[in-house]
Amino acid sequence: AAGVIQSPRHLIKEKRETATLKCYPIPRHDTVYWYQQGPGQDPQFLISFYEKMQSDKGSIPDRFSAQQFSDYHSELNMSSLELGDSALYFCASSPGGQGWEQYFGPGTRLTVT
Amino acid sequence: KQEVTQIPAALSVPEGENLVLNCSFTDSAIYNLQWFRQDPGKGLTSLLLIQSSQREQTSGRLNASLDKSSGRSTLYIAASQPGDSATYLCAVQGAQKLVFGQGTRLTINP
């Protein structure tokens, strides 16, 4: 069965650089979620999209932006990277909005040096 | 604001024992609760999903229960094996987002 695809799997950037993370949801899933997991921490919700519209927003820094495209894939854009942005970034998808099970991708490990 | 707490933070048991991991949440207005497994530095593997209308779910040696009114869930692992060593996270879904607990780091000793 097709799963959530995230690219790249690993990314190394320097401070003040920009990074773009991509997420390809399971086919026919119209909702995408982004979570950030810092070292030794639990995943924290960043932002979600339903039918290409932002549906919920969590503790996402102003330096980050995201969007969902017409094919339902999503991109998380991160600018002016800081050391504290080093984390695992997970994308999850679901076949609807509220109440549906979320299926997680393998994550992108971002290291900021 | 939903808060999820997992107890204990770490647990070490000998192989073969049955064990229980606990999860509590402050807001009972949830759609579902999920239990995940995470190996060090790896992704999240979904173990069990319990809808708010359900009381338990079973998969192999795993059984999860949900008491929504009291804001509690337990994950029961039978006949533990060294391969079960990992961090176990519970997460509740309110409106859309998942709110995670801090996890229980489980070590099964051969």
Image: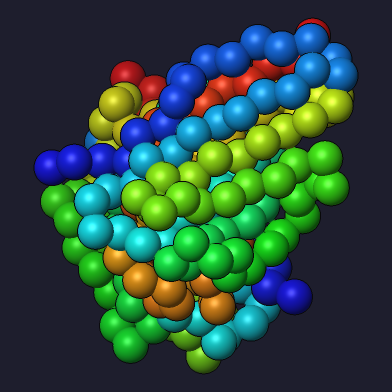
How far from the left and from the top, in percent, is residue A36? 64, 41
Q: Is residue A100 left or right of residue A32?
A: left
Occupied quadrant, residue A56: bottom right
How far from the left and from the top, in percent, is residue B49? 32, 64
Give the answer, above or below, for where A39 lies relative to A103: above
Give the answer, above or below, for where B90 lies relative to B70: above
Q: Nearer the viewer, residue A59 or B107?
A: A59
Quadrant the N terminus of chain B occupies: bottom right
Q: Nearer the viewer, residue B16 or A16?
A: A16
The answer, for residue A34, to whether it is visible in the render is: yes
Occupied quadrant, residue A20: top right
Q: How many marks?
A: 0
Q: Is residue A55 left or right of residue A13?
A: left
Q: Is residue B104 left or right of residue B27?
A: left
The answer, for residue B65, to whether it is visible in the render is: no
Identify which residue is drawn at 51% across, 90% down: B69
Give the answer, above or below, for where B97 lies relative to B28: above
How far from the left and from the top, in percent, is residue A101? 35, 64
Quadrant the C terminus of chain B occupies: top left
Q: Nearer the viewer, residue B9 or B79?
A: B9
